[in-house]
Image (spheres, rainbow, N blue to C red):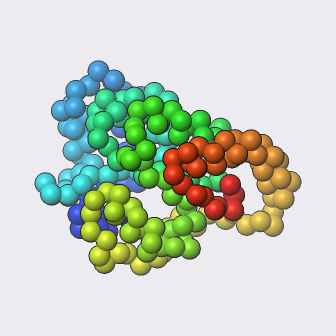
Amino acid sequence: HFLAQHDQICMADGKEVHLFDAPDFDPQWSVDEINQRYAAHFQAATPAQLLGEATPIYLYWPEVIPALHEYNPELKLVIMLRCHSYRTRGNYAEQLQHLRRYYPDQQILIIDNSELVTQHNQTLARICKFLGVADANLPVPARIFAGDYSKNGHRICRRLLKYWFRQANKRLKNLLSDMGYSPNWPWL
């Protein structure tokens, strides 16, 4: 939502393209064939704009990362972590370790979902700097996906998930530290 408002960036029409995890995806496709399939999602793009898409499941499926790297080893990846997902999808340490086999840390930016709320301008400025675009005229904060994650209703479930993720989050915190991050996120 926010990157789509930047005049130097064209985000794909629709939030999730699912090109690399589509049932008909063929890892043998050439860069030109992939670009042809992507073109339908970037009809409003100008030649000077960076192209971007947001398909969160790409991080989860191990076979997608090598395909992304084959397509473009220079990709910059912005990973937004949050703790409102299925148990296995929330196992971020394992997914990030796999990602780091194909992309160096300099091409990966990790942020926490809450940073867009609590440090909106600073977070968008970090993303812009990472992508190499201007950070002037940043979009104003807005609540985009307002799910009901209230703490009142599912106390037992939250305790079970906290227990389930204890070791995984410890590994994630160590991995992030190794990548140069100092995450101070409540869920971590």
Q: Is residue 47 left or right of residue 19?
A: left
Q: How many labels sit on residues?
A: 0
Q: Quadrant of residue 34?
A: top left
Q: In the image as oriented, which residue stretches furthest toward the right?
A: 156
The N terminus - image quarter: bottom left
- x and y percentages locating residue 57 in the rendered image: 50, 41
On screen, 80 above or below 137?
above
Instruction: Kindly tell me whether residue 80 is visible in this rendering.
Output: no
Residue shown at 81%/46% (left/top)?
A: 163
Q: In the image as oriented, which residue stretches furthest toward the top?
A: 28
On screen, 48 above or below 57?
below
Q: Is residue 98 left or right of residue 172?
A: left
Q: Nearer the viewer, residue 42 or 115?
A: 115
- x and y percentages locating residue 13 in the rendered image: 32, 54
The C terminus - image quarter: bottom right
Residue shown at 26%/25% (left/top)?
A: 29
Residue shown at 63%/45% (left/top)?
A: 174
- x and y percentages locating residue 137 in the rendered image: 31, 78
Q: Is residue 134 left or right of residue 144?
A: left
Q: Nearer the viewer, residue 122 or 149?
A: 122
Q: Is residue 58 left or right of residue 163?
A: left
Q: Nearer the viewer, residue 118 or 157?
A: 118
Instruction: Kindly tell me whether residue 69 is visible in this rendering.
Output: yes
On screen, 127 above or below 71?
below
Q: In the image as oriented, which residue stretches furthest toward the left?
A: 47
Residue shown at 30%/36% (left/top)?
A: 73
